[in-house]
Amino acid sequence: MKILDKYISKQFAKSFLFMFLLFIPIGILVDVSEKIDKFKEHDLSFYEVFNYYLDFIWYYGYFLFPIFVFLAVIWFTSKLSSNSEVVAILSSGVSFKRYLQPFVTTSIVIAMVSIFSGMFIIPEKNKSFTIFQNKYLSKKNRTNNLQSVYKQISENEYLYVSSYNKTRNQAYNFSIEKFNGNKLQEKILARNIRWIEKDSLFRLTDYFKRTFKNQSEEIVSKRIFDTLMNFNMSDLEIVNFQAKTLNFFELNRFIDIERKSGSPLLSSHILEKNKRITIPVSVIILTVLAVVVSSFKKRGGIGLNLALGITLAFIFVFFDKFFSVLVTESNLNPYVGAWIPNLIFALVTAYIVKLSLK
């Protein structure tokens, strides 16, 4: 049995590497054809483009990790089945459950590598990948106008602006509230607020301040008021990609800060955290599913199994994207959005395995 385990594990790993080396270059060629005009426009050197595609491999390779594993197992087990090797193995007294064991063991090893990469290596690669994209490939003014920013800037201070123009360094319908316990202590309103770089201060237009002391209320209003405040204009920027560039420990701290500040992107950040666990788990689930659907001879052979595998892979990617969008756009619980594709495929896999063991 050890010989069989080693054989299956070795062929599994080789098939996975084959799929990776097959699809990643195709992805690079497609991406180059789409972005070559941008590269020329910015007069980028070969070294810069080369480093970008090194990050590209990590960025997309990690996301497609489960799919490569799935197709690799289907490819390998379909060849075993077409050569009647699976029948020979099972006829020799090896149970189907025991036959699955080396596949599961290898997938667990791959999943562990995926977990470590997702926690610590991929975020660093995402950082340089995203910086390059924002600098050279993204449309200009993409994040110049941000709507409805609400943040906690200290333990007892809360800031709100209806919109923020990054180009002009100016925010509109500004308000900041300061609390003493549960009681409102001070509130500042302004039609707009702008950072004056040369004077290193904030300029508020139509400034209005209310201060509550005991049973009295003090009101101050000015047409123009220059002052210093306990935040930076950069605090008003909503950075959607930041969570992807943080390692696991940094991400946990970042989520705590975003939760306290009332960030509108909190669900997206929690989704990102959970994805770093669900992707490796999906490697194991899809491995078992691939073995079950491709280990027995069918009319059409390897071609039919690969067609079925690609179809199931697309369905899995669709579910993953669909529920991720529901989290960011429709307030679906991020834990549900992250785990439900795995749950659906786990149930399907368990059902098919049950039928196979009968």
Image: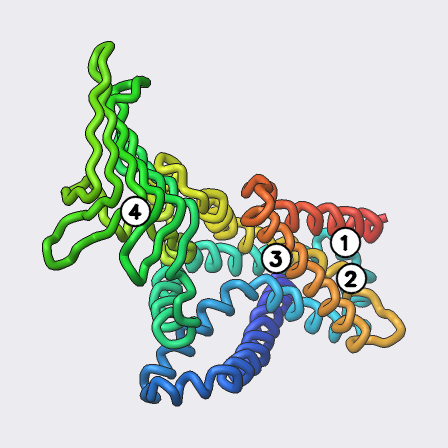
Looking at the image, is 287 positioned above or below residue 23?
above
Q: 326 or 315, which is in the foreground?
A: 326
Q: How far apart, in angstroms, are the residues tagged by discs 1 and 2?
A: 16 Å
Q: How far apart, in angstroms, are the residues tagged by discs 3 and 2?
A: 24 Å
Q: Are marks 3 and 4 in contact (CB under 8 Å)?
A: no
Looking at the image, is 192 positioned above or below residue 317?
above
Residue at the extreme top:
215
Give the foreground label among 4 and 1.
4
User: Residue 95, which numbered label?
Assistant: 1
Q: Amino acid at mark 2?
A: Val
User: Mark 3, residues whose alpha carbon is within 10 Å: few (<14), some, or many (≥20)?
Assistant: some
Q: How far apart, in angstroms, are the residues tagged by discs 3 and 1?
A: 37 Å
User: Residue 293, which numbered label?
Assistant: 2
Query: Which comes sooner in the sequence, label 1 or label 2?
Result: 1
Query: Which comes sooner in the sequence, label 4 or label 1?
Result: 1
Q: Toward which corner of the image does residue 264 lie, by quadrant?
A: top left
Residue at the image position 42 percent from the left and 59 percent from the top:
117
- Identify residue for label 3: 321
Would residue 327 be found to the left or right of residue 227 on screen? right
- Identify residue for label 4: 192
Residue at the image position 79 percent from the left and 77 percent from the top:
303
Numbered disc 1: secondary structure: loop
- Residue 103 in the image, given as x and y percentages of width and height: 64, 60
Would residue 337 be found to the left or right of residue 289 on screen? left
Numbered disc 3: secondary structure: helix
Q: How far apart, in angstroms, are the residues tagged by discs 4 and 1?
A: 73 Å
Q: Toward which corner of the image does residue 244 lie, by quadrant?
A: bottom left
Residue at the image position 84 percent from the left and 50 percent from the top:
355
Q: Amino acid at mark 4?
A: Asn
